[in-house]
Image: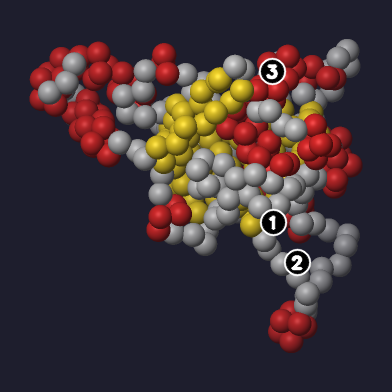
Amino acid sequence: MSEKLTIVNGNDFLNNRFMKREFIIEPFFMTQGLMMIYAQRGIGKTYFAMTLAAAMIQGISLFDNRFKISRKQKVLYIDGEMSGHDMQERFKSLSIPKENLDNIRIFNPDLQAPLGVSPNLASTEGQELINEDGQWADVIIVDNLSTLARDVSENQSNSWDIVQSWALKLRSQGKSIIFIHHAGKNNTQRGTSRREDVLDTVIKLRRPAEYNSKEGARFEIHFEKSRGFVGEDAESFEVKLELNNGKTIWICDKINSQESRRAEEIMQLYEDGISQRKIAEIVGTSLSKVNRVIQNNK
């Protein structure tokens, strides 16, 4: 390390004027905040992340005021895998007024043709590619770690160091970051748990116990890590995406506790080696529902 470290005495530290932290999304995401949102493939995490981005650049609250957003933010959205056309159609469905579109900058792989340059945020070169836009933004959304941190070994904690150092550097500059990530086979975030050490908030999106694929994007929002907020604010809830004339509408509801308890009972019996047909008899439900619960919770 060539630069000298700054170390001060107690008086100087207490008299230092640090940046005051304010809510970006109340009650869980603040300025200089680091957050991860993860889910299995196909649940709707990118639509969810785009919805957050659209709300932040407009300064509007979400999900029946559960996510309170009172100030407009500048958002850099770095997409690593979606086609340009699909991403464009999704943003159109969010009905963002034109006057707010200057508050968002978007990276998409299809914009890079014919060179195909895409930032690898697990390298200093990749980080430099987005440095100018990163300095412009208040919030940076990285969607997703698998495609945009390509040199990070899923299960080796030390390979995460370069991404973590980059995130901490941006945080010291007043930036906030949202990482989008995949869930693994065990339904936890894929790879090393060390990723969560510096995060303020971890949100898991999970299908409801008896979810049917015909329902489209319907999932539960669970706060797995939440520094600084508890009680009702940290309670899980369910959302369902509906499209009305091509426009996005999110319907919110409480989680069906009876359904959740039945799903837990089904999974416990399944893990105990009981056949699905026998489980249906014990729980008092149909074989198709038992199968659906198992598939959604594997």
Mark in front: 1 vs 3 = 3
Residue 7 image point, x, y percent: 78, 75
Residue 231 image point, x, y percent: 40, 58
**Residues at circles 2 and 3 in contact by the CB criterion of under 8 Å:** no
Residue at 74% from the left image edge and 47% from the top image edge: 73
Residue occupied by mark 2: 19
Callout 1 secondary element: loop
Amino acid at the residue labelled 2 = Met
Badge 2 or badge 3: first in the primary sequence: 2
Residue occupied by mark 1: 31
Residue 123 visible, this angle: no
Residue 117 visible, this angle: yes
Amino acid at the residue labelled 1 = Thr
Observer-nearest of 279 and 101: 101
Q: Is residue 245 left or right of residue 130?
A: left
Badge 2 or badge 1: first in the primary sequence: 2
Callout 2 secondary element: loop
The quadrant of the picture occupied by the C terminus is: top left
Residue occupied by mark 3: 89
Badge 1 or badge 3: first in the primary sequence: 1
Residue at 83% from the left image edge and 19% from the top image edge: 111
Residue at 46% from the left image edge and 47% from the top image edge: 223
Amino acid at the residue labelled 3 = Glu
Q: CA distance from mark 2 to mark 3?
A: 38 Å
Q: Is residue 63 left or right of residue 93?
A: left
Residue 187 against residue 59 in the figure, above or below:
above
Q: CA distance from mark 1 to mark 3?
A: 29 Å
Q: Could you say which disc has been placed on residue 240 in the image? A: none
Q: Residues within 10 Å of mark 2 (few under 14, many from 20)?
A: few
Mark in front: 2 vs 3 = 3
